[in-house]
Image (cartoon, rainbow, N blue to C red):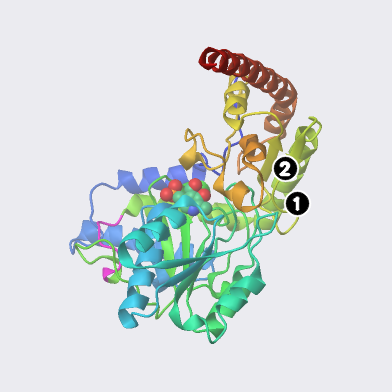
Amino acid sequence: MTAAYLDHASTTALRPEALDAYVAETARGAGNPSSLHSAGRRARVAVEESREALAAALGARPGEVVWTSGGTESDNLALTGLYRARRDADPARRRVLLTATEHHAVLDCVESLAAREGAEVTWLPVDATGLVDLDALAAELRPDRAGDVALVSLMWANNEVGTVQPVAAAAELAHAAGVPLHTDAVQAVGQLPVDFAASGADLLSLSAHKFGGPVGTGALLVKRGTALVPLLHGGGQELGVRSGTLDAAGARASAAALTAATGDLPGQAQRLAQLRDRLLAGLTQVPGAVVRGAPPGPGRLPGNAHVTFAGCEGDSLTYLLDAAGVECSTGSACRAGVPQPSHVLLAMGLEAAEAAGALRFSLGWDSTAADVEAAVAAIGPAVERARRARSSRGGRAHRRSRTLAGGVS
Ligand code: PLP
Protein backbone atom coordinates (compact mmCIF):
# COMPACT_ATOMS: atom_id res chain seq x y z
CA MET A 1 0.00 0.00 0.00
CA THR A 2 1.38 3.44 -0.87
CA ALA A 3 0.85 5.93 1.90
CA ALA A 4 -1.40 8.95 1.45
CA TYR A 5 1.11 11.79 1.64
CA LEU A 6 -0.64 14.86 3.06
CA ASP A 7 2.36 16.86 4.22
CA HIS A 8 3.16 19.00 1.18
CA ALA A 9 3.65 22.12 3.29
CA SER A 10 6.63 20.33 4.79
CA THR A 11 8.06 19.32 1.42
CA THR A 12 6.73 18.16 -1.95
CA ALA A 13 7.99 15.50 -4.34
CA LEU A 14 10.03 16.78 -7.29
CA ARG A 15 7.78 17.52 -10.24
CA PRO A 16 8.73 15.45 -13.32
CA GLU A 17 9.63 18.67 -15.18
CA ALA A 18 12.04 19.59 -12.39
CA LEU A 19 13.61 16.14 -12.31
CA ASP A 20 14.12 16.18 -16.10
CA ALA A 21 15.64 19.67 -15.96
CA TYR A 22 17.94 18.68 -13.09
CA VAL A 23 19.14 15.50 -14.79
CA ALA A 24 19.64 17.24 -18.16
CA GLU A 25 21.69 20.03 -16.61
CA THR A 26 23.78 17.69 -14.46
CA ALA A 27 24.40 15.41 -17.44
CA ARG A 28 26.04 18.28 -19.30
CA GLY A 29 29.03 17.84 -17.03
CA ALA A 30 31.16 20.22 -15.01
CA GLY A 31 30.92 23.98 -15.28
CA ASN A 32 31.07 26.70 -12.64
CA PRO A 33 28.81 29.59 -13.72
CA SER A 34 31.57 32.01 -12.66
CA SER A 35 34.23 30.41 -14.88
CA LEU A 36 35.18 32.12 -18.12
CA HIS A 37 35.67 29.00 -20.25
CA SER A 38 32.95 27.45 -22.41
CA ALA A 39 31.73 25.02 -19.75
CA GLY A 40 31.43 27.87 -17.28
CA ARG A 41 29.61 30.09 -19.76
CA ARG A 42 27.16 27.27 -20.51
CA ALA A 43 26.41 26.86 -16.81
CA ARG A 44 26.01 30.64 -16.56
CA VAL A 45 23.39 30.53 -19.32
CA ALA A 46 21.49 27.90 -17.33
CA VAL A 47 21.51 30.09 -14.22
CA GLU A 48 20.48 33.24 -16.09
CA GLU A 49 17.71 31.59 -18.11
CA SER A 50 16.36 30.11 -14.88
CA ARG A 51 16.58 33.50 -13.18
CA GLU A 52 14.53 35.00 -16.01
CA ALA A 53 11.90 32.24 -15.79
CA LEU A 54 11.65 32.57 -12.00
CA ALA A 55 11.32 36.34 -12.22
CA ALA A 56 8.70 36.13 -14.99
CA ALA A 57 6.56 33.74 -12.92
CA LEU A 58 6.68 36.06 -9.90
CA GLY A 59 6.29 39.55 -11.38
CA ALA A 60 9.92 40.43 -10.66
CA ARG A 61 12.86 41.59 -12.74
CA PRO A 62 15.63 39.04 -13.32
CA GLY A 63 18.06 41.38 -11.57
CA GLU A 64 15.91 41.19 -8.43
CA VAL A 65 16.45 37.43 -7.98
CA VAL A 66 19.18 36.36 -5.54
CA TRP A 67 19.66 32.59 -5.50
CA THR A 68 19.93 31.06 -2.02
CA SER A 69 19.85 27.61 -0.42
CA GLY A 70 16.17 27.87 0.52
CA GLY A 71 13.61 29.57 2.72
CA THR A 72 15.64 29.65 5.92
CA GLU A 73 18.60 31.33 4.26
CA SER A 74 16.37 33.77 2.37
CA ASP A 75 14.62 34.80 5.59
CA ASN A 76 17.93 35.19 7.44
CA LEU A 77 19.48 37.21 4.62
CA ALA A 78 16.39 39.41 4.37
CA LEU A 79 16.03 40.15 8.06
CA THR A 80 19.64 40.34 9.14
CA GLY A 81 20.83 42.00 5.93
CA LEU A 82 18.08 44.61 5.98
CA TYR A 83 18.27 45.22 9.73
CA ARG A 84 22.02 45.84 9.57
CA ALA A 85 21.75 48.10 6.54
CA ARG A 86 18.98 50.21 8.09
CA ARG A 87 20.66 50.38 11.50
CA ASP A 88 24.04 51.23 9.98
CA ALA A 89 22.45 54.10 8.03
CA ASP A 90 20.66 55.38 11.16
CA PRO A 91 21.50 53.84 14.56
CA ALA A 92 18.07 54.87 15.90
CA ARG A 93 16.37 52.35 13.63
CA ARG A 94 16.20 49.19 15.71
CA ARG A 95 12.56 48.22 15.88
CA VAL A 96 11.32 45.18 13.95
CA LEU A 97 7.55 44.82 13.56
CA LEU A 98 6.16 41.31 13.12
CA THR A 99 3.51 38.88 14.32
CA ALA A 100 4.21 35.92 16.58
CA THR A 101 2.80 33.55 13.92
CA GLU A 102 5.84 33.77 11.64
CA HIS A 103 7.92 30.68 10.82
CA HIS A 104 10.86 30.02 13.13
CA ALA A 105 13.23 30.98 10.29
CA VAL A 106 11.93 34.53 10.85
CA LEU A 107 11.20 34.44 14.58
CA ASP A 108 14.50 32.94 15.69
CA CYS A 109 16.47 35.21 13.38
CA VAL A 110 14.78 38.31 14.82
CA GLU A 111 15.26 36.98 18.35
CA SER A 112 18.95 36.54 17.61
CA LEU A 113 19.14 40.12 16.33
CA ALA A 114 17.46 41.24 19.56
CA ALA A 115 19.82 39.22 21.75
CA ARG A 116 23.04 40.19 19.95
CA GLU A 117 22.55 43.30 17.84
CA GLY A 118 20.22 45.59 19.76
CA ALA A 119 17.05 44.93 17.77
CA GLU A 120 13.78 45.63 19.55
CA VAL A 121 10.79 43.53 18.63
CA THR A 122 7.26 44.90 18.51
CA TRP A 123 4.76 42.07 18.25
CA LEU A 124 1.74 42.82 16.09
CA PRO A 125 -1.46 41.17 17.30
CA VAL A 126 -3.37 38.62 15.20
CA ASP A 127 -7.03 37.63 15.47
CA ALA A 128 -8.39 34.15 16.20
CA THR A 129 -7.79 33.12 12.55
CA GLY A 130 -4.19 34.34 12.55
CA LEU A 131 -4.86 37.49 10.53
CA VAL A 132 -2.65 40.47 11.39
CA ASP A 133 -4.24 43.58 12.90
CA LEU A 134 -3.50 46.26 10.29
CA ASP A 135 -4.70 49.04 12.61
CA ALA A 136 -2.04 48.00 15.10
CA LEU A 137 0.55 48.10 12.30
CA ALA A 138 -0.67 51.54 11.22
CA ALA A 139 -0.40 52.76 14.83
CA GLU A 140 3.23 51.58 15.05
CA LEU A 141 3.98 53.38 11.78
CA ARG A 142 2.47 56.76 12.75
CA PRO A 143 4.89 59.60 11.97
CA ASP A 144 5.66 60.09 15.67
CA ARG A 145 6.46 56.38 16.15
CA ALA A 146 7.99 55.21 12.87
CA GLY A 147 11.38 56.92 13.20
CA ASP A 148 12.97 53.98 15.00
CA VAL A 149 11.48 51.22 12.83
CA ALA A 150 14.04 49.20 10.91
CA LEU A 151 11.63 46.95 9.03
CA VAL A 152 8.33 45.11 8.91
CA SER A 153 8.15 41.38 8.22
CA LEU A 154 4.80 39.77 7.38
CA MET A 155 4.47 36.27 5.96
CA TRP A 156 2.38 35.86 2.81
CA ALA A 157 0.66 32.70 4.06
CA ASN A 158 1.02 30.80 7.30
CA ASN A 159 2.62 27.37 7.13
CA GLU A 160 0.48 25.85 9.89
CA VAL A 161 -3.04 27.24 9.52
CA GLY A 162 -2.82 28.57 5.94
CA THR A 163 -4.04 32.09 6.71
CA VAL A 164 -3.16 34.57 3.94
CA GLN A 165 -1.95 37.97 5.14
CA PRO A 166 -2.72 41.36 3.54
CA VAL A 167 0.85 41.90 2.36
CA ALA A 168 0.09 44.64 -0.17
CA ALA A 169 -1.87 46.69 2.38
CA ALA A 170 0.90 46.26 4.95
CA ALA A 171 3.54 47.28 2.39
CA GLU A 172 1.57 50.40 1.59
CA LEU A 173 1.43 51.37 5.27
CA ALA A 174 5.14 50.64 5.67
CA HIS A 175 6.14 52.65 2.61
CA ALA A 176 4.02 55.63 3.66
CA ALA A 177 6.24 55.67 6.77
CA GLY A 178 9.45 55.16 4.77
CA VAL A 179 9.92 51.63 6.15
CA PRO A 180 10.75 48.55 4.01
CA LEU A 181 8.76 45.30 4.22
CA HIS A 182 9.89 41.69 3.92
CA THR A 183 7.48 38.87 3.22
CA ASP A 184 8.11 35.17 3.74
CA ALA A 185 6.20 33.73 0.76
CA VAL A 186 7.62 30.22 1.13
CA GLN A 187 4.16 28.64 1.45
CA ALA A 188 2.44 30.95 -1.03
CA VAL A 189 4.68 30.60 -4.09
CA GLY A 190 3.24 27.87 -6.31
CA GLN A 191 -0.15 27.87 -4.56
CA LEU A 192 -1.30 31.48 -4.81
CA PRO A 193 -0.71 34.15 -7.45
CA VAL A 194 2.40 35.98 -6.24
CA ASP A 195 3.33 39.20 -8.03
CA PHE A 196 6.37 40.77 -6.40
CA ALA A 197 5.99 44.19 -8.03
CA ALA A 198 2.26 44.41 -7.35
CA SER A 199 2.71 43.31 -3.72
CA GLY A 200 4.90 46.31 -2.98
CA ALA A 201 7.19 44.14 -0.84
CA ASP A 202 10.86 45.06 -0.81
CA LEU A 203 12.06 41.52 -0.08
CA LEU A 204 10.36 38.17 -0.69
CA SER A 205 11.57 34.72 0.40
CA LEU A 206 10.81 31.52 -1.49
CA SER A 207 11.94 27.90 -1.39
CA ALA A 208 11.89 25.48 -4.32
CA HIS A 209 11.11 22.28 -2.43
CA LYS A 210 7.72 23.68 -1.46
CA PHE A 211 6.53 23.83 -5.07
CA GLY A 212 8.05 20.72 -6.60
CA GLY A 213 11.65 21.86 -7.00
CA PRO A 214 14.72 20.46 -5.26
CA VAL A 215 15.55 20.83 -1.57
CA GLY A 216 18.48 23.21 -1.12
CA THR A 217 17.52 25.85 -3.67
CA GLY A 218 15.56 29.02 -3.06
CA ALA A 219 15.68 32.70 -3.73
CA LEU A 220 15.29 36.07 -2.14
CA LEU A 221 13.64 38.67 -4.35
CA VAL A 222 15.21 42.04 -3.64
CA LYS A 223 13.52 45.13 -5.00
CA ARG A 224 15.94 47.29 -6.94
CA GLY A 225 17.60 49.82 -4.66
CA THR A 226 17.06 47.88 -1.40
CA ALA A 227 20.26 47.94 0.68
CA LEU A 228 21.26 44.60 2.23
CA VAL A 229 24.38 43.72 4.20
CA PRO A 230 25.53 40.27 2.94
CA LEU A 231 25.70 37.34 5.34
CA LEU A 232 28.00 35.16 3.24
CA HIS A 233 31.34 36.52 2.13
CA GLY A 234 33.48 34.92 -0.53
CA GLY A 235 33.48 34.88 -4.30
CA GLY A 236 31.14 37.84 -4.66
CA GLN A 237 28.46 35.99 -6.65
CA GLU A 238 24.98 37.51 -6.95
CA LEU A 239 26.46 41.02 -7.07
CA GLY A 240 28.17 40.41 -3.76
CA VAL A 241 24.88 39.90 -1.89
CA ARG A 242 25.25 36.13 -1.65
CA SER A 243 28.63 34.53 -2.24
CA GLY A 244 28.91 30.85 -3.07
CA THR A 245 29.14 28.79 -6.25
CA LEU A 246 25.86 28.98 -8.14
CA ASP A 247 23.90 25.75 -8.57
CA ALA A 248 23.01 25.58 -12.28
CA ALA A 249 21.07 22.30 -12.02
CA GLY A 250 19.17 23.49 -8.93
CA ALA A 251 18.31 26.73 -10.71
CA ARG A 252 17.09 24.88 -13.83
CA ALA A 253 14.98 22.48 -11.73
CA SER A 254 13.50 25.30 -9.61
CA ALA A 255 12.55 27.31 -12.67
CA ALA A 256 10.99 24.26 -14.32
CA ALA A 257 9.01 23.47 -11.15
CA LEU A 258 7.76 27.03 -10.79
CA THR A 259 6.84 27.29 -14.46
CA ALA A 260 4.83 24.07 -14.09
CA ALA A 261 3.27 25.20 -10.80
CA THR A 262 2.17 28.57 -12.13
CA GLY A 263 1.13 27.34 -15.60
CA ASP A 264 -2.44 26.75 -14.46
CA LEU A 265 -2.52 28.25 -10.99
CA PRO A 266 -6.29 28.98 -10.85
CA GLY A 267 -7.15 25.48 -12.09
CA GLN A 268 -4.74 23.82 -9.68
CA ALA A 269 -5.92 26.01 -6.77
CA GLN A 270 -9.52 25.08 -7.49
CA ARG A 271 -8.64 21.37 -7.63
CA LEU A 272 -6.78 21.58 -4.31
CA ALA A 273 -9.53 23.63 -2.66
CA GLN A 274 -12.13 21.02 -3.66
CA LEU A 275 -10.01 18.21 -2.24
CA ARG A 276 -9.33 20.28 0.88
CA ASP A 277 -13.04 21.01 1.42
CA ARG A 278 -13.88 17.31 1.15
CA LEU A 279 -11.08 16.58 3.63
CA LEU A 280 -12.34 19.19 6.09
CA ALA A 281 -15.88 17.86 5.78
CA GLY A 282 -14.61 14.37 6.64
CA LEU A 283 -12.32 15.46 9.47
CA THR A 284 -15.01 17.53 11.16
CA GLN A 285 -17.33 14.50 11.38
CA VAL A 286 -15.20 13.56 14.38
CA PRO A 287 -16.70 14.93 17.62
CA GLY A 288 -14.52 17.68 19.12
CA ALA A 289 -12.82 18.56 15.81
CA VAL A 290 -12.43 22.30 15.18
CA VAL A 291 -11.06 23.86 11.97
CA ARG A 292 -8.41 26.51 12.75
CA GLY A 293 -7.27 29.40 10.60
CA ALA A 294 -9.21 31.47 8.09
CA PRO A 295 -12.38 30.07 6.51
CA PRO A 296 -11.86 28.31 3.16
CA GLY A 297 -11.71 30.98 0.43
CA PRO A 298 -9.22 33.54 -0.80
CA GLY A 299 -7.97 34.13 2.76
CA ARG A 300 -6.63 30.59 3.12
CA LEU A 301 -4.12 28.47 1.21
CA PRO A 302 -6.13 26.12 -1.02
CA GLY A 303 -4.12 23.07 0.05
CA ASN A 304 -4.27 23.64 3.80
CA ALA A 305 -6.55 21.82 6.24
CA HIS A 306 -5.80 22.42 9.91
CA VAL A 307 -7.92 20.89 12.64
CA THR A 308 -7.61 20.47 16.41
CA PHE A 309 -9.05 17.36 18.05
CA ALA A 310 -10.04 17.94 21.68
CA GLY A 311 -8.59 15.50 24.21
CA CYS A 312 -5.79 14.26 21.91
CA GLU A 313 -2.09 14.80 21.45
CA GLY A 314 -1.23 15.74 17.86
CA ASP A 315 1.99 13.70 18.07
CA SER A 316 0.07 10.53 19.02
CA LEU A 317 -2.36 11.16 16.18
CA THR A 318 0.42 11.50 13.61
CA TYR A 319 1.89 8.13 14.72
CA LEU A 320 -1.50 6.42 14.62
CA LEU A 321 -2.33 7.89 11.21
CA ASP A 322 1.10 6.96 9.91
CA ALA A 323 0.48 3.37 10.98
CA ALA A 324 -2.77 3.58 9.00
CA GLY A 325 -0.90 4.81 5.91
CA VAL A 326 -1.69 8.53 6.23
CA GLU A 327 1.19 11.00 6.51
CA CYS A 328 0.47 14.41 7.98
CA SER A 329 1.97 16.72 10.56
CA THR A 330 1.21 18.51 13.80
CA GLY A 331 2.20 21.80 12.20
CA SER A 332 5.65 23.00 11.40
CA ALA A 333 7.73 19.98 10.43
CA CYS A 334 10.85 21.93 11.36
CA ARG A 335 9.67 21.77 15.02
CA ALA A 336 8.15 18.31 15.02
CA GLY A 337 9.47 16.22 17.85
CA VAL A 338 9.62 19.24 20.15
CA PRO A 339 6.79 18.64 22.62
CA GLN A 340 5.47 22.20 22.82
CA PRO A 341 2.14 23.59 21.71
CA SER A 342 2.29 25.47 18.42
CA HIS A 343 3.39 29.08 18.82
CA VAL A 344 1.00 29.96 15.97
CA LEU A 345 -2.05 28.55 17.74
CA LEU A 346 -1.05 30.17 21.04
CA ALA A 347 -0.71 33.55 19.27
CA MET A 348 -4.22 33.00 17.87
CA GLY A 349 -5.48 32.73 21.45
CA LEU A 350 -5.84 28.96 21.91
CA GLU A 351 -5.16 27.37 25.28
CA ALA A 352 -2.17 25.02 25.38
CA ALA A 353 -4.49 22.03 25.88
CA GLU A 354 -6.52 22.89 22.78
CA ALA A 355 -3.39 23.51 20.73
CA ALA A 356 -1.95 20.13 21.74
CA GLY A 357 -4.45 18.28 19.56
CA ALA A 358 -3.46 20.00 16.30
CA LEU A 359 -3.06 18.26 12.95
CA ARG A 360 -2.11 19.85 9.65
CA PHE A 361 -2.98 18.13 6.40
CA SER A 362 -1.50 19.84 3.36
CA LEU A 363 -2.22 18.98 -0.25
CA GLY A 364 0.04 19.49 -3.22
CA TRP A 365 0.52 19.01 -6.92
CA ASP A 366 0.32 15.20 -6.85
CA SER A 367 -2.46 14.86 -4.23
CA THR A 368 -5.43 12.72 -5.20
CA ALA A 369 -8.99 12.12 -4.05
CA ALA A 370 -7.80 8.70 -2.82
CA ASP A 371 -5.33 10.42 -0.44
CA VAL A 372 -8.17 12.45 1.01
CA GLU A 373 -10.47 9.45 1.40
CA ALA A 374 -7.70 7.53 3.16
CA ALA A 375 -7.35 10.35 5.70
CA VAL A 376 -11.11 10.63 6.19
CA ALA A 377 -11.38 6.88 6.79
CA ALA A 378 -8.46 6.79 9.23
CA ILE A 379 -9.14 9.84 11.37
CA GLY A 380 -12.10 8.60 13.48
CA PRO A 381 -10.43 5.42 14.80
CA ALA A 382 -7.13 7.28 15.32
CA VAL A 383 -8.77 9.99 17.43
CA GLU A 384 -10.66 7.39 19.45
CA ARG A 385 -7.45 5.47 20.21
CA ALA A 386 -5.50 8.64 21.00
CA ARG A 387 -8.22 9.74 23.42
CA ARG A 388 -8.37 6.34 25.10
CA ALA A 389 -4.57 6.25 25.44
CA ARG A 390 -4.52 9.74 26.88
CA SER A 391 -7.24 9.13 29.42
CA SER A 392 -5.68 5.85 30.59
CA ARG A 393 -2.29 7.62 30.86
CA GLY A 394 -4.03 10.44 32.74
CA GLY A 395 -5.70 7.91 35.05
CA ARG A 396 -2.39 6.14 35.76
CA ALA A 397 -0.65 9.47 36.41
CA HIS A 398 -3.49 10.50 38.74
CA ARG A 399 -3.24 7.23 40.71
CA ARG A 400 0.55 7.56 40.88
CA SER A 401 0.38 11.13 42.18
CA ARG A 402 -2.20 10.10 44.83
CA THR A 403 0.10 7.31 45.97
CA LEU A 404 3.06 9.68 46.18
CA ALA A 405 1.03 12.31 47.99
CA GLY A 406 -0.18 9.64 50.39
CA GLY A 407 3.40 8.59 51.04
CA VAL A 408 4.32 12.13 52.00
CA SER A 409 1.51 12.56 54.47
N1 PLP B 1 9.23 29.88 5.93
C1 PLP B 1 8.10 29.14 5.91
C2 PLP B 1 6.77 29.83 5.97
C3 PLP B 1 8.17 27.75 5.84
O1 PLP B 1 7.05 27.02 5.83
C4 PLP B 1 9.46 27.13 5.80
C5 PLP B 1 9.58 25.66 5.78
O2 PLP B 1 8.75 24.95 6.32
C6 PLP B 1 10.60 27.95 5.79
C7 PLP B 1 10.44 29.32 5.86
C8 PLP B 1 11.97 27.36 5.69
O3 PLP B 1 12.21 26.95 4.38
P1 PLP B 1 13.39 25.90 4.02
O4 PLP B 1 12.91 24.56 4.46
O5 PLP B 1 13.52 25.98 2.54
O6 PLP B 1 14.60 26.35 4.72
* Placement of 406 over or under 203, stated as above or below: above
Q: Amino acid at mark 1?
A: Pro
Q: Tell me the residue at 31%/66% (across/down).
A: 117
- Residue 289 lies, in percent from the top left, at 75, 35
Q: Which residues are magenta?
A: 240-246
SS label for mark 1 = loop
- Residue 213 lies, in percent from the top left, at 47, 47
Do labels 2 and 1 touch, CB within 8 Å? yes
Q: Tell me the residue at 57%/35% (across/down).
A: 329
Q: In which quadrant of the rendered view does residue 225 lie?
A: bottom left
Mark 1 neighbour class, 10 Å CA radius: few under 14, some 14 to 19, many 20 or more: many
Nearer to us in this view, 181 or 236: 181
* N-term-proximal mark, 2 vs 1: 2
Tell me, for residue 296, which label it has, or none: 1
- Main SS category, magenta section: loop
- Report if the beta carbon of the residue with label 2 is closer than 8 angstroms to ligand 1: no
- Residue 148 lies, in percent from the top left, at 44, 79
